[in-house]
Image: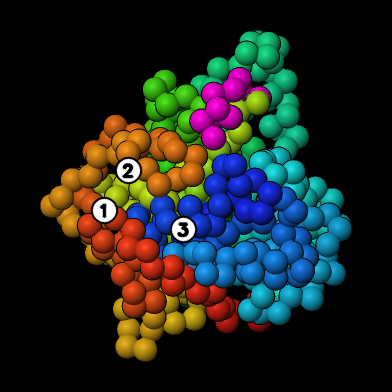
Amino acid sequence: MIDDQVHCREPGLTHKADLATESSAAVAGGITSFMEMPNVDPQTTNKQALQDKYKLAENRCRTNYGFYMGATNTNIEDIKSLNINEACGVKAFLGASTGNMLVNDPMALELLFEHAPIMIVTHCEDSPMIWENEQKAKEKYGEDIPVTEHPYIRSDEACYKSSSLTIEMAKKYDALLHILHLTSAKEMDLFSDLHRSKKRITAEVCVHHLWFDETSYKDKGAFIKCNPAIKTSKDRESLVAALNSGKLDVIATDHAPHTKEEKLRSYFDSPAGLPLVQHALPALFDLANRNEVSLELIIDRACHAPADLFGVEDRGYIREGYYADLALVNPKKSYSVNKSNILYKCGWSPFEQHTFGTSIDTTIVNGTIVYDDNELTGAIVGKRMTFNRSRN
C-alpha cells in the first residue's frame, strides 16, 4: 500500500508521533510508502523546510517517504519555484482544520491553481458554514457539545460547497487536482467514473470513512472525531458504491494521531484525527470479506492508483526492475487489536478490541524484510520516493 495522506507530526509535535514510530506502525500494517503532510511546526511551506524534513527522515523511516509542500495565503513564489521531484504535491487546506493553514484569500487560490507546477491536493470544507453550524450548536448545547453533533457541524453541505468550488477552479486553470478524504453522498455527483488515466481531477476516500458511520460515535466518541467528519450510514454506503464505480480513485488513511489525553477533552478542545496506518489494510480486507469491495479493487486503489496519480517512480506494481515493496497478507489468520500490539506513539487505536479476519504476515521494503511474524526486524531501509508527474 502507498498511503498518499499521513501526518507523522514531525517536526514540532513529536509528543503525538514521529517519523520513526509511525513508519514502524505503517510497515506492521503492510504500508510500504507514505506521503506526509505539511501542518507541522515549523510548517512545511518553503523549500528549506522541505529539505529539512527529508533530512529528518534519512535512516529513520522503515517505509519509503515523500513530503508535501503546504500552501498559504502568501507563499505562491515558493510554490512556483518547486521542481517536479522536490515534493509529492502541494497541500491546500480549504477548510479550517488542525494546523492553522487555512487558505482563504481568493487571489491566493487563483494563483495557486494557475501556477502550481505539480499536483494540488485539497482538504475541502467551507469554513463560514462550519462556523455558523458551531454557533447553532452552542446556542443549543452551550460549550458542552456532544461529539454526535460533529457530522452536522462539519456537514455534507459544507463539504459540497468547498469541493464544487475547488473543482471549478481546477477546471478554469486546467490544474491537476486530487481532493482528499471525501465523506458525503452529495459530493459523489461531482466526480467522473472514467479511469484515472483519463482524468485531471481525482478523488480519495479514507479507510475510516468506509468503515465507521454516525452510529459509531456512541461507542467511540471523540476517538473517531476527524475532519471532514464521519457521517451517516447512507454516506458510507455511497462512498463504497463510488469506490466500486471508479468515481473514487485512491484509498488512503489520513493517519492523524493525537494523545489519548488530548482526545478526551471537551468537543472544541479535542483535536480531530485518528491513527490508522497499522490497521488500514486489515480493515480493507474485512470489507472484502463482507463483499463490499474486491481484493482486486483494494490492490488497484491502494497500490497502483497512488503511484499512477503522483508519478511515483518504480513503485506501486509488482514488475521486473521495480523496487520490491510487498505485503504478504494471511487471509486465514485473525488479528485482534489490543494495547500490547499497537505501535503508534499515541498508544491507542479506534479498532481496539476488534478482531480482523486477516493479518499482515510479512512486509518487505526495497527488497528487505522489515516486519515478520508480528515483529519488526530492525531493518530501517526506507528511501525518499521520486516523482515524475507535472501538471503538464
Please state the horizontal and vertical placement of residue 201, each as a whole percent of the image: 58, 64
Depth check, front residue: 155 or 346: 346
Check disc 2 and give the amino acid type: Asn
Depth check, front residue: 382 or 299: 382
- Observer able to see residue 199: no
Which quarter of the figure is the C terminus placed in? bottom right
Which quarter of the figure is the N terminus placed in? bottom left
In three-dimensional space, the C-alpha distance between marks 1 and 2, rounded to whole angstroms, equals 8 Å
User: At x 78% / y 65%, what residue is drawn?
Assistant: 46
Q: Are marks 3 and 1 in contact (CB under 8 Å)?
A: no
Lower sequence index among marks 1 and 2: 2
User: At x 21% / y 50%, what residue is drawn?
Assistant: 358
Which residue is under mark 2? 341
User: At x 73% / y 26%, what residue is drawn?
Assistant: 132
Q: Residue reaching furthest bottom?
A: 321
Element marked by disc 2: helix
Residue 136 is one of the magenta-drawn residues:
no
Element marked by disc 3: helix
Check disc 3 and give the amino acid type: Ser
| Residue 172 against residue 38 in the figure, above or below | below
Q: Is residue 275 left or right of residue 336?
A: right
